[in-house]
Amino acid sequence: MKIFQKQVKQLSDEELMKMLSKGNQKAFDEIYVRYSEILFGYFMKMLARDKEKCEDMVHDLFAKIIRKPDYFDVNRSFRTWVFSVACNMCKNEYKRMSVRKHVSNDFEPTKSIQSDSDTLKKVHESTFSDSFYEALNSLDEKHKSVFALRHFEGFSMKEIAETLQINEGTVKSRLFYATKTLASELKEFNPIYNQ
Amino acid sequence: MEEKYIQIFSKSSFQELTNEEKSFISELCSNEEEFESVKHLYSGMETLSNETFRLNSDSVKRQLDQEFKEIHANEGGFRLFSFLFPPIKPLYAKPGLQIAFLLVFVFTLYYSLNNISIDNKPKQLYSQNEVEENEGQEKLKEVSENKTEIEMESTAEELLTESNESTVLVENGTREIVTREIVTMDTEIMSSDLITAEMIGDVEEDSFFDEGILLESPSVPSPTAMAISGLDRAGGIEDKFIIEPIGEDLELLEDLFVTF
């Protein structure tokens, strides 16, 4: 049994997916071990750290892999494929959230202009991490996904292009735009400007 | 390319960058302020990269394992079964049940139509046959009865007509012919009687004449003449024994022969 486990661990993602499509439980377990935490972290960063929602997203993603393993093209990298599925799921979730926002705006009274106390509270209480994720979530989805894949998941420009199915030039421009926006948003945390 | 960026932003200040490096990062940051902010962002993100998110793996994994077993449990030679009854799809969307319902519908339709035809056809046929048989028997009976009646009537009529005709003939002057025949027959009988009488030796001379006189009188016919003419001794008519004498009337023979 231990020999078999070693063999499974030595296999590539693509080979595991082949076994998974034939109903191999061990292959599925290995894929889950390799990607469940990574994908959960990605969803957490992309979906404003909503833990329950992110758990559901991970479940849905793996359920898709179980139900439709044939959708995976063996010639493609599993890593880029699974993240492209995750990105599409995030896009759909943003759409749902925006709909909910519009609906809730119709019923909720409009908020008044932020008072000075709110601004002070924001400056003093928020840490860099909170501000960073807040700024990241304020970004457009296409810029956010490129930035997250590049800096959190360690994807190369080529892999990002493959995952999002865009050319590398577009990836680069989107990445620079996201970096500049975030840098300017988080400028107050720079000790040089605080002095 | 990415490692080159890391190397550039790892440098302490914008002033230390070469012109080549500055042109390389010009798209991202064009001045010292932008360089510093990006540099700070990257350093801050390094601390964030240590942040790990723990997934409550047990509950999610348990659900996924269950789904996996449901999908792949029947794949050991039962792919058709798993195709017909996929575990995740709702009950109404399972192809096996859909096919089963379709088959049931088709069979019920077929049998309902077939039962109507099977139940009614033999009954109708049987009833028709019965009716036909009864009708046939009744017709046969009627026909036979009619036939017998017709035959009876016809025979009766024929007999009546024949007797009438004979009586008419007798009455209308054909009596002479009849009497002639009777006379001839009587003479033969009488001659035979005479022969016997001669043999016995008891002959009456006037008897022949007397008989002749008697024959000429229509009121009392002889027994043979009565028998031939259909008159019994009591004076009644027996039509069955009437034989129409042809005599000189040859036209009567025409109906006796078939001519083509």
Image (cartoon, rainbow, N blue to C red):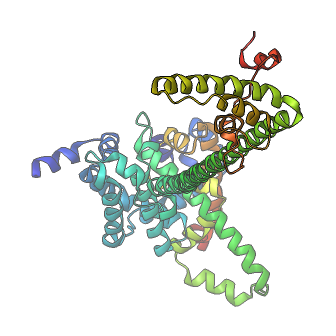
Which is nearer the eye, A38 or A7?
A7
Locate the C terminus of chain B and report the quarter of the image it occupies.
top right
In the picture, measured across the screen, residue B125 lies left or right of residue A24, that is right
What is the quadrant of residue A14 in the picture?
top left
Which residue is pictured at 38% across the width and 64% down the height?
B50
Which is nearer the eye, A188 or A127?
A127
Which residue is pictured at 37% across the width and 60% down the height?
A36
Q: Is residue A44 visible?
A: yes
x and y, in percent, of residue B127 in the image: 58, 55
In the picture, measured across the screen, residue B88 lies left or right of residue B249, that is left
In the picture, measured across the screen, residue A7 lies left or right of residue B132, that is left
In the picture, measured across the screen, residue B171 lies left or right of residue A182, that is right
Which is nearer the eye, B102 or A189?
B102
Which residue is pictured at 65% across the width and 46% down the height?
B148
Which is nearer the eye, B70 or B100?
B100
x and y, in percent, of residue A109 in the image: 78, 87
Q: Is residue A195 visible?
A: no
Which residue is pictured at 66% across the width and 47% down the height?
B233
x and y, in percent, of residue A135 in the image: 61, 67
Extreme residue in the right direction:
B172
Extreme residue in the bottom direction:
A117
Extreme residue in the top direction:
B260
